[in-house]
Image: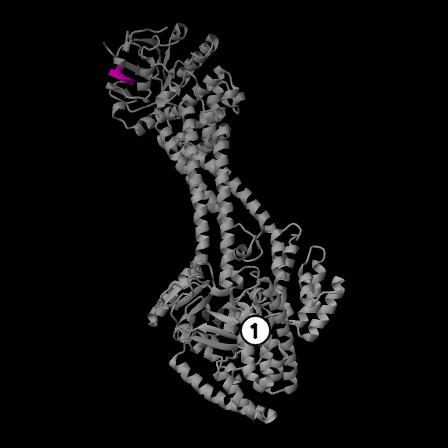
């Protein structure tokens, strides 16, 4: 076809689109809608993809993850929560691996990692009091011992009273008999009079028989990510210290995830109050919301957690305060505490503030305080339980992911302590540790010498030893913030981090476009291969496990919808074009008679669809783009924690790119053209003689 | 029946076409037959036609409805091919040409005027007339416009150049069709009942116009009609009935 013919072809096509307005409108509307949905859907999925990418890559995974080819399971950073921790093998020499990886272009940083699960012992209120008493006994501070004894007695009396009322409720219950017996004994003046004769023995009795009577015993499970903390902070933009300080380089240390700290480690009653407050801030009221009421009732049931933490003095001060606040002249502390916690819409704000002002200072608001050490207990790879005390330096959060559960998953631990807990050390490292221990041993002796000199504790030592041999461990001491292990072992050479074992390594890239990630992944694989290292390299999506598939699933769903829609559109367009062809038989016949080739006629139909496709697709894309721009300003609010993670923040701000629009229009055009093929072929077969009169 | 007879018409200038063996015969049909399948039977629209049209002739094709006029025009107009016999147009045996070559032949050598005008609705007068020139793609824009304007002037539609077919009267539309048929300077213009949809006065004027162009441009015309008044304008009238030429000897008016 020549150029001038092409000119007239487009003109005819354009005008035909206008002439057959009704048909054009129907087909155009379908194309408009299709383009709109494609643009909108893609923008949404891309925004989620982008949000999730940022959520995952900037918080934990980096762009690529490297782990051993010997792994039994696939790396799943966010865990197969039901199947336990995956066994991903280990990287015996992180340094060697990092050296290879860092030479690969586009690699910005390589951060060692290891994820594990530990139990943090929370203890209960009685345990805490007993731990303080034990500390005083250990220190041999008689004045302290007397004071602590008083406190323990007061608490036990309260437990005894509580137990008595519980026993009344379950009248005739025999299970309580021995408990009651023990509690009575512990509360008796005789017990306390004789306490000093066998302090450690009696402490053991209290710890084993009395403390469990308080039903708040609990270990708390925590996920931790062992890593090079300094490198982690440098390379994961989402990291932000909330409270406390960074773990100094070369020090063992632990950083709580702030969300985890607030929601798990915080005092139960405070947590419940916070939770109620958050929901009330969202304009729910106790009067109307059953869930809020159930939370409140649960909280009232937790009053003992406050009660048992108050020492005699604090109890008195809280009692008198509560009497004033509640306008009561009678009632004991347990009753008033419960009444106090029975909040309603009118008094909640006052009581919330009162709690933090008058009660919180007297209780341990967090199960572990910043600056203190916590015991972590984990099962090593060999299967035996191992515990380590590690100092909590502070709390951190992943910016924008504060509200997401996944953003609250990991607590951070230094790499060296991680290795201890995980029970994996290279022989080389083991030798070093042995050497360190020897050095540390010297220091210990020195310190103990000093203590002995100060307190003349010659007599205390055998007792302590006896207690330990009786099976006590140091957990009870943890809460009081004593560094139990040698200080020397809390330190290490920062280079140590690099030299040991890691389970996996995060690779952060300079250019993180998907195609670049893929390219670098291949380059890394090749580099490891060349270095004789058998490693797996996965992108963050794969490393995120099920979570990483989410976007793929969403995208698939979107495309399935689009394809179904397009197929329906195809049928409709095809039909309406065939009808249009039938209506134009004479005109087409005339063109053919006058000298238009078949190709011209076919091209005419294609041109008409193209015009229509461009117009309606273009308008559809622009409308969708406008909608997205508007939406991108306001943002789509995340409805829950998971959405916060997907959106990488509280709101999703979808953006639209030219490529989105172009791709959608081209796709729609392509489909429209396919739907035109049959009508076009039909039109091209129209005989020129139909232009002549109908006479045979 | 003798095919080449009568009317030695002046081969006026124009078309110096492939000087064929059939001395200045532009169209030559020998024993042309055309059968159409109709359900299970076959309808013979043409039952062996011999006919010669010479260059510059103005020939009317007369006959009742169903006699085969349109079929004959279809064969001559290269929009259909004969079932048997030969049809030679401007030196080409149409039975031997491909679809594409037939189309090209129509575009280059023929012009069509239809009973119901068959203009392209979305194009204005100028564009309708320009259409075949655009398909040919031989002339530049200026030349094309010049060509269109001069033919528009000849058919007297200078005022209506920018109007669409729907805005024109029947006579005006047929003038546009005539202009479109002639704008490529074809050697033969075929007109199928060009006046059937027009009142007799307009019809007369249209025939006059065709006759005039036959004289001035030297274009050969072959048109079908069943209107005796129109036939009187022809150099000769070829009568058809039942798919056969009755007498090719119809003389001049």
Q: Which chain is home to disc 1?
A: A
| A575 in relation to B66, above or below | below
| B64 in relation to B77, above or below | above
Q: Name the secondary structure under disc 1.
A: helix
User: In the rendered picture of this protein, how many numbered marks are placed on residues?
Assistant: 1
Which corner quadrant of the image does residue A282 belong to?
bottom right
Which corner quadrant of the image does residue A309 belong to?
bottom right
Residue A571's x, y, as percent? Answer: 41, 34
Q: Between residues A516 and B143, which one lies in front from this camera angle?
A: A516
Task: Work out which quarter of the rendered image holds the C terminus of chain B and state it.
Answer: top left
Name which residue lies at 72% across and 71% down.
Answer: A317
Q: Between residues A118 and B237, which one lies in front from this camera angle?
A: A118
Residue B64 on the magenta span: no
Res. B140 visible in picture: no
Residue A652's x, y, as percent? Answer: 56, 53
Name which residue lies at 28% across and 17% down.
Answer: B39
Where does label 1 land, which residue? A181
Residue range (magenta) = B24-42
Name which residue lies at 53% across and 58% down.
Answer: A645
Residue A143's x, y, as percent? Answer: 66, 85
| A503 in relation to A401, above or below | below
In this rendering, position of residue A24 left or right of residue A679: right
Residue A150's x, y, as percent? Answer: 65, 79
Res. A395 visible in picture: yes
């Amino acid at each position: 076809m020549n150029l001038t013919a092409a000119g007239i072809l487009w003109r005819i096509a354009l005008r035909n689109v206008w002439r057959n307005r009704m048909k054009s409108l129907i087909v155009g509307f379908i194309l408009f809608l299709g383009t709109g949905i494609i643009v909108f859907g893609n923008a949404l999925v891309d925004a989620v993809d982008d949000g999730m990418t940022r959520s995952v890559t900037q918080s934990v995974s980096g762009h690529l993850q490297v782990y051993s080819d010997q792994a039994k399971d696939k790396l799943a950073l966010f865990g197969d929560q039901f199947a336990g921790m995956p066994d991903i093998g280990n990287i015996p020499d992180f340094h060697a691996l990092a050296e290879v990886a860092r030479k690969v272009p586009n690699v910005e940083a390589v951060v060692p990692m290891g994820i594990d699960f530990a139990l943090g012992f929370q203890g209960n209120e009685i345990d805490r009091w007993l731990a303080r008493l034990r500390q005083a006994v250990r220190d041999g501070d008689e004045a302290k011992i007397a004071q602590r004894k008083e406190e323990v007695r007061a608490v036990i009396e309260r437990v005894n009273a509580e137990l008595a009322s519980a026993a009344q409720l379950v009248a005739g219950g025999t299970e309580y008999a021995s408990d009651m017996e023990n509690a009575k004994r512990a509360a008796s003046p005789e017990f306390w009079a004789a306490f000093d004769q066998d302090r450690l023995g009696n402490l053991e009795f209290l710890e084993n028989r009395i403390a469990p009577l308080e039903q708040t015993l609990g270990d708390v499970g925590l996920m931790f990510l062992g890593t090079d903390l300094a490198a982690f902070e440098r390379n994961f933009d989402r990291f932000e210290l909330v409270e406390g300080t960074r773990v100094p380089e070369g020090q063992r240390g632990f950083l709580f995830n702030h969300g985890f700290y607030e929601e798990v480690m915080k005092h139960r009653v405070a947590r419940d109050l916070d939770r109620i407050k958050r929901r009330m801030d969202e304009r729910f009221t106790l009067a109307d919301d059953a869930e809020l009421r159930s939370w409140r009732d649960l909280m009232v049931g937790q009053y003992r957690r406050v009660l048992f933490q108050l020492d005699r003095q604090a109890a008195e001060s809280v009692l008198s305060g509560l009497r004033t606040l509640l306008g009561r002249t009678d009632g004991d502390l347990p009753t008033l505490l419960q009444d106090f916690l029975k909040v309603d819409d009118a008094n909640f704000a006052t009581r919330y503030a009162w709690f933090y002002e008058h009660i919180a200072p007297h209780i341990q608001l967090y199960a572990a305080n910043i600056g203190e050490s916590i015991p972590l207990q984990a099962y090593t790879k060999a299967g035996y339980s191992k515990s380590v005390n590690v100092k909590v330096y502070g709390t951190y959060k992943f910016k924008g992911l504060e509200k997401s559960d996944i953003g609250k998953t990991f607590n951070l631990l230094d790499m060296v302590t991680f290795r201890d807990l995980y029970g994996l050390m290279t022989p080389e490292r083991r030798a070093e540790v042995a050497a360190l221990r020897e050095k540390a041993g010297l220091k210990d002796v020195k310190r103990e010498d000093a203590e002995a000199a100060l307190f003349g504790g010659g007599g205390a030592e055998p007792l302590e030893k006896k207690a330990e041999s009786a099976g006590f461990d140091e957990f009870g001491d943890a809460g009081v913030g004593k560094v139990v292990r040698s200080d020397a072992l809390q330190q290490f050479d920062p280079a140590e981090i690099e030299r040991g074992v890691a389970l996996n390594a995060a690779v952060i890239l300079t250019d993180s476009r998907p195609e670049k990630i893929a390219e670098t992944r291949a380059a890394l694989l090749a580099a490891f291969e060349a270095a004789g290292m058998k490693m797996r390299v996965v992108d963050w999506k794969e490393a995120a496990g099920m979570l990483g598939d989410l976007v793929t699933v969403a995208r698939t769903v979107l495309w399935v919808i689009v394809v179904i829609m397009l197929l329906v559109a195809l049928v409709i367009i095809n039909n309406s074009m065939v009808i249009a062809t039938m209506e134009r038989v004479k005109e087409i016949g005339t063109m053919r008679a006058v000298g238009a080739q078949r190709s011209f006629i076919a091209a005419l139909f294609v041109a008409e669809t193209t015009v229509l496709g461009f117009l309606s697709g273009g308008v559809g894309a622009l409308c969708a783009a406008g909608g997205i721009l508007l939406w991108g300003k306001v943002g789509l609010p995340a409805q829950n924690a998971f959405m916060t993670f997907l959106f990488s923040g509280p709101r999703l701000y979808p953006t639209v790119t030219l490529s989105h629009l172009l791709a959608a229009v081209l796709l729609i055009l392509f489909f429209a053209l396919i739907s035109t093929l049959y009508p076009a072929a039909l039109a091209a077969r129209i005989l020129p003689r139909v232009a002549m009169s109908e006479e045979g | 029946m003798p095919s080449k007879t009568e009317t030695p018409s002046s081969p006026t200038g124009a078309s110096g076409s492939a000087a064929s063996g059939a001395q200045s015969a532009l169209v030559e049909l020998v024993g042309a037959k055309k059968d159409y399948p109709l359900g299970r039977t076959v309808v013979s629209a043409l039952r062996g036609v011999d006919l010669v049209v010479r260059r510059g002739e103005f020939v009317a094709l007369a006959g009742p409805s169903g006699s085969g006029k349109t079929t004959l025009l279809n064969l001559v107009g290269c929009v259909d091919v004969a079932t048997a016999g030969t049809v030679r147009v401007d030196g080409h045996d149409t039975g031997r040409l491909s679809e594409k070559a037939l189309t090209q032949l129509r575009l280059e050598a023929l012009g069509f005027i239809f009973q119901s005008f068959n203009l392209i609705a979305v194009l204005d007068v100028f564009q309708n007339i320009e259409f075949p020139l655009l398909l040919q793609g031989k002339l530049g824009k200026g030349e094309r416009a010049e060509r269109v304007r001069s033919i528009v002037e000849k058919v007297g539609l200078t005022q209506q150049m920018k109007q669409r077919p729907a805005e024109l009267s029947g006579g005006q539309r047929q003038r546009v069709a005539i202009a479109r048929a002639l704008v490529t300077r074809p050697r033969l213009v075929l007109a199928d009942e060009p006046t059937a949809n027009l009142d007799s006065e307009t019809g007369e004027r249209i025939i006059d116009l065709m006759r005039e162009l036959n004289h001035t441009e030297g274009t050969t015309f072959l048109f079908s009609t069943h209107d005796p008044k129109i036939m009187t304008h022809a150099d000769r009238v070829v009568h058809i009935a039942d798919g056969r030429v009755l007498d090719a000897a119809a003389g001049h008016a």
